[in-house]
Image (cartoon, rainbow, N blue to C red):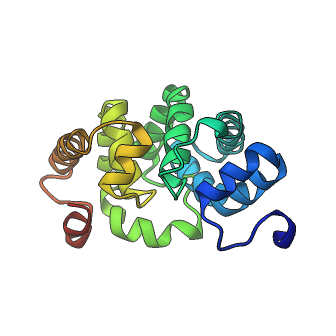
Amino acid sequence: MFSRLGTPTDDDASLIARSVIEPEVFGILYERHAAAIHRYVARRLGGALADDVVADTFLIAFRSRARYDQARRAAEPWLYGIASNVVAKHHRSEVRLYRAYLRTGTDPVAEPYSDRVEARVLAAEFRRPLAKALARLSARDRDVLLLIAWADLSYEQVSQALDIPVGTVRSRLHRARRRVRSALDGINPTTPDEESTNG
């Protein structure tokens, strides 16, 4: 399949450019990124909405592919930005999910894939207060925090994803982390090296 449509080593920008003429090439981009986008959305909204949000994300990306900035060789920030906009339409569902975490103390959508991320971001005894803090964050601050913590994007990638300056990413992240730390009695739920690598 890849020999006709592209190769696994083709960068995202090349695939998107080719997909304008050959729409089927866009399928490679889907295969490359859909699982990661799905995991991110499922963490935010639960599995019931994740399939629909991912489908909407890639449909929007497909329809706007001719306007993709070819200087951005990796499409992850673009796709996460679209996904974040679609997630925003489900704000009430996201807050409801965090409130469910708060009530039960368990993460109803945690899957084995999340073990690595969860080890960095969540300690079991902090799930309830963290869920409460996440529910209370503004959507804009929550987007920045979760794109860094759950999608593993850098400050620059979050800047691209949300179409905001890097300085705004830093200030929103600082505010979100301060509020989360406060909710956790001063404990930082992220690893120290995350702050140094992204900062």
> Can residue 183 be seen from the camera position used here?
yes
In the rendered structure, the answer to whether residue 181 lies left or right of residue 79 reads: left
- Residue 128 lies, in percent from the top left, at 35, 49
Q: Quadrant of residue 20?
A: top right
Looking at the picture, tell me which residue is in the foreground, 110 or 172. Answer: 172
The N terminus lies in quadrant? bottom right
The image shows residue 84, relative to residue 105, as above or below, that is above
When asked about the image quadrant of residue 67, the answer is top right
Q: Residue at x 48, y 52 (%)?
A: 72
Q: Position of residue 168 (x, y in %)?
A: 23, 38
Q: As drawn, is 27 to the left or to the right of 38?
A: right
- Looking at the image, residue 152 lies above or below residue 23: below
For image coordinates 38% across by 71% down, the residue present is 119
- The answer to whether one can see residue 123 in this image is no
The percent coordinates of residue 167 (x first, y second) are: 20, 42
Indicate left or right for 31 with 115 as reference.
right
Query: Which residue is pictured at 65% across the width and 74% down the height?
Result: 9
Q: Residue furthest left?
A: 186
For the residue pair 131 and 114, the one nearer the viewer reads as 114
Residue at image coords 65%, 47%: 47
Q: Quadrant of residue 194?
A: bottom left
Residue 185 x/y as whole percent = 14, 52
The quarter of the picture where the C terminus appears is bottom left
In front of the other: 73 or 41: 73
Q: Is residue 162 left or right of residue 167?
A: right
Tally the numbered discs: 0
Foreground of the two, 182 or 13? 13
Above or below residue 32? Residue 27 is: above
